[in-house]
Image (cartoon, rainbow, N blue to C red):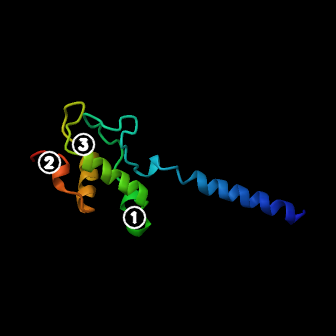
Amino acid sequence: MDTRRTRPLLLLAVTAALLTGCGGGRSDGSFDAQPGTPSPTCLQHQEQEPGGRYTGGQESDPTAVLEMMRFYTANGAKAYCDGRPPTDADLRWTRLYTDLGGDAGHVAAPPPK
Protein backbone atom coordinates (compact mmCIF):
# COMPACT_ATOMS: atom_id res chain seq x y z
CA MET A 1 0.00 0.00 0.00
CA ASP A 2 1.35 3.43 -0.96
CA THR A 3 1.13 5.56 2.21
CA ARG A 4 1.85 8.74 0.22
CA ARG A 5 -1.60 8.36 -1.33
CA THR A 6 -3.58 7.13 1.66
CA ARG A 7 -2.34 9.67 4.20
CA PRO A 8 -3.90 12.71 2.49
CA LEU A 9 -7.18 10.82 2.10
CA LEU A 10 -7.12 9.75 5.73
CA LEU A 11 -6.33 13.30 6.85
CA LEU A 12 -9.18 14.64 4.72
CA ALA A 13 -11.61 12.08 6.17
CA VAL A 14 -10.61 12.85 9.77
CA THR A 15 -10.85 16.61 9.16
CA ALA A 16 -14.30 16.25 7.60
CA ALA A 17 -15.50 14.16 10.53
CA LEU A 18 -14.25 16.73 13.04
CA LEU A 19 -15.79 19.66 11.18
CA THR A 20 -19.12 17.87 10.85
CA GLY A 21 -19.28 17.65 14.65
CA CYS A 22 -18.85 21.42 14.97
CA GLY A 23 -22.42 22.06 13.83
CA GLY A 24 -21.95 25.51 12.32
CA GLY A 25 -23.41 27.49 15.23
CA ARG A 26 -27.08 26.63 15.59
CA SER A 27 -26.36 23.50 17.59
CA ASP A 28 -24.24 25.45 20.08
CA GLY A 29 -26.96 27.70 21.43
CA SER A 30 -26.81 30.42 18.82
CA PHE A 31 -28.65 33.67 19.43
CA ASP A 32 -31.39 34.61 16.96
CA ALA A 33 -30.95 38.33 16.33
CA GLN A 34 -33.90 38.35 13.92
CA PRO A 35 -31.67 39.20 10.91
CA GLY A 36 -34.66 39.43 8.57
CA THR A 37 -36.01 42.34 10.62
CA PRO A 38 -33.22 44.82 11.44
CA SER A 39 -35.57 47.00 13.55
CA PRO A 40 -38.19 44.62 14.96
CA THR A 41 -41.28 46.02 16.63
CA CYS A 42 -41.49 42.96 18.88
CA LEU A 43 -39.27 40.05 19.91
CA GLN A 44 -39.34 36.42 18.88
CA HIS A 45 -38.60 33.94 21.65
CA GLN A 46 -35.14 32.41 21.63
CA GLU A 47 -35.32 28.73 20.72
CA GLN A 48 -31.96 27.77 22.22
CA GLU A 49 -30.16 28.59 25.44
CA PRO A 50 -26.76 30.32 25.27
CA GLY A 51 -23.99 28.02 24.12
CA GLY A 52 -20.22 28.08 24.37
CA ARG A 53 -19.89 30.71 21.65
CA TYR A 54 -21.36 33.12 24.21
CA THR A 55 -20.47 31.60 27.57
CA GLY A 56 -16.98 30.24 26.93
CA GLY A 57 -15.05 33.13 28.49
CA GLN A 58 -11.88 33.65 26.47
CA GLU A 59 -13.03 30.90 24.11
CA SER A 60 -16.23 32.82 23.25
CA ASP A 61 -16.84 34.22 19.78
CA PRO A 62 -16.51 38.01 20.21
CA THR A 63 -18.51 38.76 17.05
CA ALA A 64 -21.42 36.59 18.23
CA VAL A 65 -21.33 38.11 21.72
CA LEU A 66 -21.29 41.66 20.34
CA GLU A 67 -24.20 40.89 18.01
CA MET A 68 -26.26 39.63 20.96
CA MET A 69 -25.29 42.65 23.08
CA ARG A 70 -26.15 45.08 20.27
CA PHE A 71 -29.51 43.41 19.67
CA TYR A 72 -30.59 43.57 23.32
CA THR A 73 -29.32 47.12 23.75
CA ALA A 74 -31.51 48.24 20.82
CA ASN A 75 -34.49 45.90 21.20
CA GLY A 76 -34.41 43.98 24.47
CA ALA A 77 -37.14 45.90 26.29
CA LYS A 78 -39.73 45.29 23.54
CA ALA A 79 -42.62 42.90 24.15
CA TYR A 80 -42.69 39.42 22.67
CA CYS A 81 -44.69 39.15 19.46
CA ASP A 82 -46.96 36.42 20.87
CA GLY A 83 -47.78 38.50 23.97
CA ARG A 84 -46.42 35.83 26.30
CA PRO A 85 -43.77 36.32 28.97
CA PRO A 86 -40.15 35.36 28.36
CA THR A 87 -39.34 31.66 28.29
CA ASP A 88 -36.55 30.10 30.36
CA ALA A 89 -34.29 30.35 27.30
CA ASP A 90 -35.17 34.06 26.89
CA LEU A 91 -34.36 34.69 30.55
CA ARG A 92 -30.99 32.96 30.25
CA TRP A 93 -30.08 35.18 27.31
CA THR A 94 -31.12 38.36 29.10
CA ARG A 95 -29.28 37.24 32.23
CA LEU A 96 -26.17 36.66 30.10
CA TYR A 97 -26.62 40.14 28.61
CA THR A 98 -26.64 41.76 32.06
CA ASP A 99 -23.88 39.46 33.39
CA LEU A 100 -21.69 40.70 30.52
CA GLY A 101 -22.32 44.31 31.53
CA GLY A 102 -25.47 45.16 29.58
CA ASP A 103 -27.81 47.66 31.19
CA ALA A 104 -30.77 45.87 32.82
CA GLY A 105 -32.97 48.72 31.59
CA HIS A 106 -32.48 47.46 28.04
CA VAL A 107 -34.21 44.13 28.69
CA ALA A 108 -37.67 43.24 29.93
CA ALA A 109 -37.93 42.53 33.63
CA PRO A 110 -38.35 38.86 34.49
CA PRO A 111 -41.91 37.85 35.37
CA PRO A 112 -42.87 37.87 39.05
CA LYS A 113 -42.56 34.55 40.84
| Mark 1 Cα-neighbour bin, 10 Å: few <14, some 14–19, many ≥20 | few
Residue most toward the bottom?
Answer: 58
- The residue at 40%/35% (across/down) is 36
- The residue at 37%/47% (across/down) is 31
Q: Secondary structure at mark 3?
A: loop
Residue 81 position (above or below residue 90)? above
Residue 13 position (above or below residue 4)? above
Residue nearest the viewer, comparing 10 with 54? 54
Whole-percent x, y for residue 34 in the image? 36, 39
Whole-percent x, y for residue 33 in the image? 36, 43
Q: Are marks 1 and 2 in contact (CB under 8 Å)?
A: no
Report how far apart the C-alphas of labels 1 and 3 lie in the structure.
Answer: 22 Å
Dot 1 corresponds to which residue? Answer: 56
Dot 2 corresponds to which residue? Answer: 109
| Mark 2 Cα-neighbour bin, 10 Å: few <14, some 14–19, many ≥20 | some
Name the image quarter holding the N terminus: bottom right
Whole-percent x, y for residue 66 in the image? 36, 56
Dot 3 corresponds to which residue? Answer: 87
- The residue at 37%/58% (across/down) is 54
